[in-house]
Image (cartoon, rainbow, N blue to C red):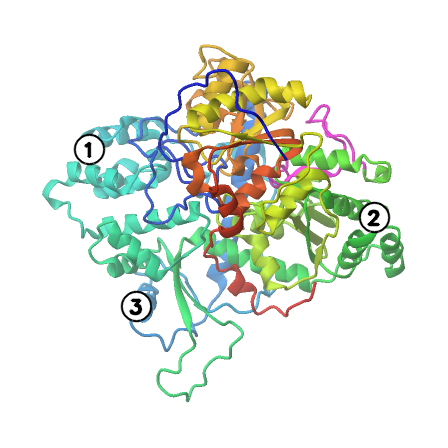
């Protein structure tokens, strides 16, 4: 590991700005989260956390797609199809929940808050109010007695129509509704530019709904309680009070949404009530009960020890089973239950007959080491977990080749297009010729291999498609980058697998968790309900040695004779920006031979004096100067495009027109309507670690300014440093905070229910 000497030229004056914007929490009003997820390595979007970048919203968040360009229609259809598929799946799950009858058995010995909460739910079961489902202590995940309807393929026309409703997938509001909402916003002194977002969030009659409950303004991403309070005071006057029941419900839901941004699928009751009190809600318990009674949230009681037996009926008073009380949003609760049910179905179903045991054993015998173990495990069961770093990808590649050699319809799915193309290249190795799949006519020049992105697989834009039952037309699915699966995506994947299919989840458990809520891969590893194969193939070279050490909490000095790792010390954020531009534009191309377009800059957050915004502005000025005449962009600009929250696609600006900003992403033309540019497109020379996860570049420059010290953690450093394939430069301004983060700061915990739902499964040794 070498240290680059101090520059002789005068550096730009540096000033310490605000702390870097937390990934996944610094959502400016009118901008959806764009893959810079929350959780590990950054200040968590806790229910009472403040967002330094939050300010009054002023940008319209239109959902309509403009223009009639073929590329725009194709890209928008893919994104809308994905969201529509999610909507259909959630509706299916909700129907299944409604079919479950019978009294709630657990919680009968609860008292105090827990009993009050359960009573609040039971009080609405008569039908006078919307029914709020109460999750009793979960039974073992099982196959439903009556097979529910499978998710059906979604046509582009149906997806684009936005029919139905689901979080994140709403129809285009009619102009009359938008105008009516605009008048209400103006009356309350709120930015009129929010009208389209409010109308989309509240639907038909949005103006009346907003007038009767001004705190519904919190349904718009980026609006904060204090802003909604000001709007409510302007509309309600003397009738506006902190103890208003409407305010209590709205703030409760807002806190649960903020918790989801931080990765939680539910919150424990004490954490929620404490956060409500900090937000000025006088009676937090009453606010939570009202929210549950109005079916805006669900309450659960989960046994702290699911394996412990239920107390006997004749037990003494007080001999109750220890439980924790959780409150969560319905969408995540149903997703976790659906995921647990689907995983149990895979585990308990008989895999499709696809060759004799002797055929599988011959395939395993032809492999080496843990690749052979993986093949044997997949031959025997429907669900297998595989862990390892970059070098271990050869093992799922060997599995895919063996499965296809046995006649299985086997496919792989990755988090993003960079990972897909990298794995596709791996399948092109001399021993993998039998894995070739037909070329994809919709992706000219794309890899003709059985590998797709998860988003493309779900939307139908990539992969084998679906059969007449709506399930994937395959026998084996190998999901790479499994730590990036949030609960909703994982549930959609599992429910889309046909009976008898096999699922293999592969990933590096040391990387950052998903941008969305949940920690699916980590929860499954801890549950030990299926075989687990740990790769014994280490990542090679100085970079592999460095990253492997970080994974176990050690920041080691490594020998780097080829300048694989270079440390660049800096004194302040201004110097960090200057040295980063120098490295990307000059030093790395000259000394390492990696051009600027193949070098990726990674920094802890979007905000701050050396965040992605400042770094991208400086890199644009050096690498592609221009006036930014297309909403801040010029042709040739490198961008990060987020068609949906949690997804980031690398791309390049090629132009703009009346229909929007024209990009090339993954070789496909994309037109982003101008009203969506601000919320979905950023410059892409510098990314956050969450945006970069799932990709690797020949060279990476990781920027650690002094004001980023509190944002660092072991998973963040592991992920950022692991994005480099040949060369890593570290612009180092955090002194001992880097080593301390690696040694002492693990991933921030996330509250999820999946471990409880899986706990009654019989443990299986891996």
Q: Is residue 151 left or right of residue 575?
A: right
* Above or below for 461 versus 146: above
Which residues are drawn in magenta? 436-463
- Number of residues whose C-alpha sits closer than 10 Å to that of mark 1, classed few (under 14), some (14–19) or many (20 or more): many
Q: Please name the residue that numbered disc 1 is placed on.
A: 188
Q: Is residue 455 above or below residue 506?
A: above
**Secondary structure beneath label 2:** helix
Q: Which residue is mark 3?
A: 113
To which quarter of the image does residue 330 belong?
bottom left
- Who's the residue at 29% across and 72% down the image? 112
Q: Which residue is mark 2?
A: 402
- SS class of the residue under badge 1? loop
Give the percent coordinates (x, y) of residue 91.
49, 50
Q: Is residue 76 left or right of residue 215?
A: right
The reply to whether dot 2 and dot 3 touch (C-beta < 8 Å) is no
**Sequence-first tag of 1 and 2:** 1
The span from disc 2 to disc 3 (Cα, nearest Å) is: 56 Å
CA gap, disc 1 and disc 2:
64 Å
């Amino acid at each position: 590991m070498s240290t680059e000497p101090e520059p002789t030229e005068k550096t730009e004056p540096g000033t310490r700005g605000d702390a870097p914007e937390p990934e996944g929490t610094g959502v400016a009003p009118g901008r959806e989260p764009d893959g810079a997820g929350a959780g590990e390595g950054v200040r968590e979007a806790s229910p009472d956390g403040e967002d330094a970048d939050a300010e009054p919203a002023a940008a319209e968040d239109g959902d309509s797609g403009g223009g009639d360009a073929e590329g725009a229609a194709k890209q928008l259809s893919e994104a809308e199809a994905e969201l529509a598929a999610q909507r259909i799946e959630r509706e299916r799950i909700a129907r299944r929940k409604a079919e479950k009858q019978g009294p709630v058995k657990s919680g009968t010995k609860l008292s105090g808050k827990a009993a009050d909460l359960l009573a609040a739910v039971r009080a609405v079961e008569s039908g006078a109010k919307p029914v709020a489902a109460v999750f009793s202590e979960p039974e073992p995940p099982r196959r439903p007695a009556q097979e529910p309807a499978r998710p059906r393929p979604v046509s582009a026309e149906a997806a684009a129509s936005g029919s139905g409703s689901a979080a994140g997938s709403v129809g285009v509001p009619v102009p009359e509704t938008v105008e009516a909402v605009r008048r209400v916003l103006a009356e309350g002194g709120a930015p009129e530019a929010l009208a389209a977002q409010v109308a989309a969030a509240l639907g038909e009659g949005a103006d009346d709904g907003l007038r009767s409950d001004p705190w519904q303004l919190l349904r718009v991403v980026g609006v904060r309680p204090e802003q909604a309070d000001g709007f409510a005071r302007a509309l309600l006057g003397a009738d506006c009070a902190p103890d208003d029941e409407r305010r209590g419900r709205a703030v409760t839901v807002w806190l649960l949404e903020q918790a989801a941004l931080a990765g939680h699928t539910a919150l424990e009751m004490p954490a929620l009530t404490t956060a409500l009190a900090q937000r000025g809600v006088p009676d937090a318990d009453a606010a939570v009960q009202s929210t549950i009674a109005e079916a805006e949230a669900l309450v659960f009681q989960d046994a702290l020890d699911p394996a412990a037996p239920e107390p006997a009926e004749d037990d003494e008073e007080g001999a109750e089973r220890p439980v924790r009380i959780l409150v969560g949003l319905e969408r995540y609760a149903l997703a976790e239950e659906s995921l647990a049910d689907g995983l149990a179905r895979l585990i308990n179903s008989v895999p499709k007959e696809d060759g004799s045991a002797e055929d599988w054993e011959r395939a395993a015998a032809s492999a080496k080491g843990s690749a052979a173990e993986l093949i044997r495990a997949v031959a025997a069961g429907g669900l297998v977990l595989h862990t390892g770093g970059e070098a271990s990808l050869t093992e799922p590649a060997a599995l895919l080749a063996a499965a296809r050699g046995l006649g299985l319809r086997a496919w792989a799915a990755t988090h993003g297009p960079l990972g897909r193309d990298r794995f596709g290249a791996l399948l092109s190795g001399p021993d993998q010729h039998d894995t070739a799949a037909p070329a994809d006519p919709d992706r000219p020049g794309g890899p003709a291999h059985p590998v797709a992105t998860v988003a493309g697989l779900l939307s139908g834009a990539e992969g084998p498609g679906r059969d007449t039952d709506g399930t994937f037309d395959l026998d084996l699915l190998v999901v790479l980058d499994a730590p990036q699966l949030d609960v909703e995506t994982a549930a959609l994947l599992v429910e889309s697998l046909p009976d008898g299919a096999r699922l293999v989840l592969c990933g590096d458990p040391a990387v950052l968790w998903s941008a969305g809520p949940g920690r699916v891969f980590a929860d499954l590893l801890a549950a030990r309900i299926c075989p687990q194969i740990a790769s014994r193939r280490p990542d090679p070279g100085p970079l592999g040695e460095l990253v492997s050490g970080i994974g176990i909490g050690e920041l080691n000095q490594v020998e780097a004779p080829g300048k694989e790792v270079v440390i660049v010390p800096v004194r302040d954020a201004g110097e960090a920006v200057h040295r980063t531009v120098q490295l990307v534009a000059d030093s790395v191309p000259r000394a390492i031979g990696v051009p600027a377009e193949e070098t990726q800059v990674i920094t802890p957050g979007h905000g701050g004096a050396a965040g992605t915004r400042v770094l991208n502005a400086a890199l644009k000025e050096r690498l592609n100067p221009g006036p930014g005449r297309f909403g801040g962009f010029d042709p040739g600009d490198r961008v990060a495009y987020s068609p949906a929250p949690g997804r980031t696609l690398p791309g390049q600006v090629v132009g703009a027109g009346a229909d929007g900003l024209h990009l090339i992403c993954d070789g496909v033309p994309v037109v982003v309507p101008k009203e969506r540019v601000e919320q979905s497109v950023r410059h892409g020379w510098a990314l956050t670690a969450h945006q970069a996860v799932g990709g690797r570049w020949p060279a990476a420059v990781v920027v650690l300014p002094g004001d980023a010290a509190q944002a660092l953690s072991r998973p963040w450093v592991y992920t950022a440093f692991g994005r480099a394939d040949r060369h890593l430069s570290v612009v180092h301004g955090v002194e001992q905070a880097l080593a301390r983060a690696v040694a002492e700061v693990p991933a921030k915990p996330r509250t999820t229910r999946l471990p409880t739902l899986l706990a009654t499964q019989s443990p299986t040794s891996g």
